[in-house]
Image (cartoon, rainbow, N blue to C red):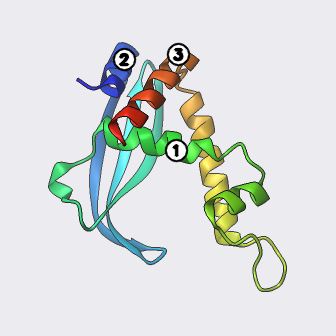
Amino acid sequence: MSVIENILNNKGFEVSSVYNGVINKDNWQRHSWSVLIQGNGLFIEVDYGKGMGHSADDGVTADDIIPCIIMDSSFAGESFEEFCDMLGYDKYDDYGRYNERSEEIWNACKEQLDNFEALGFTEEELEAIRNYIDDEGL
């Protein structure tokens, strides 16, 4: 059992997923899943995708989804401008307004962070997960 699976298990959380098939969104064709992390009366739902170089037969594990949530969430505390600068998103559209798609992604990351924080991971647990992600190259 991995560090992530062990922490989720100790907290009473389970990860389940439903395969949605192949989708093409934002010019990225990928296998798509709806993922549910739940336990102790708490839950979050996230969409997850794997590129076509991966097999859909492998499904989705906690070691797949949790590193993605943490990575996405790590940029959510930044201002919109900083978020775009760090990740290479367009800040403005052709009319000088905030780029709607970039802003949607930024807001989705903020929402995902709020939802993930609501699961009540301690700083010690999050640090153990981050170290595992770094050590395993996830």
Task: In the rendered view, tell whether residue 10 sits above or below residue 64.
Answer: above
Which residue is depicted at the point 23% across and 60% down?
54
Using a 10 Å C-alpha cutoff, classify the residue at mark 1 as few (fewer than 14 neighbours), some (14 to 19) or many (20 or more).
some
Q: Pointers 2 and 1 in contact (CB under 8 A)?
A: no
Query: What crowding class fits label 3: few (fewer than 14 Cα within 10 Å), some (14-19), or many (20 or more)?
Result: few
Q: Are marks 3 and 1 in contact (CB under 8 Å)?
A: no
Mark linked to residue 71? 1
Point out residue 72 in the picture as x, y percentages from the top left corner: 55, 47
Crowding around mark 2 (Cα neighbors within 10 Å: few <14, some 14 to 19, many 20+) is: few
Res. 67 image quadrant: top left
The local secondary structure at tag 1 comes to: helix
In this view, the residue in front, 56 or 124, is: 124
**How far apart in space, not on screen, are marks 3 and 1 (Cα)?**
17 Å
Counting residues from the start of the chain, the first of labels 3 and 2 encountered is: 2
The residue lying at 31 percent from left, 19 percent from top is: 6
The quadrant holding residue 33 is: bottom left
Pointer 3 or 1: first along the chain: 1
Which residue, as the protein is rendered here, is positioned at the far bottom? 94
Q: State the quadrant of the C terminus.
A: top left
Measured in 3D between alpha carbons, the distance from the residue under mark 2 to the one under mark 1, in whole angstroms, is: 23 Å
Residue on which the image places disc 3: 124
Q: Which mark is residue 12?
A: 2
Circles 3 and 2: CB atoms closer than 8 Å: no
Circle 2 or circle 1, nearest the eye: 1
Residue at the limit of the structure toward the left, as seen here: 57
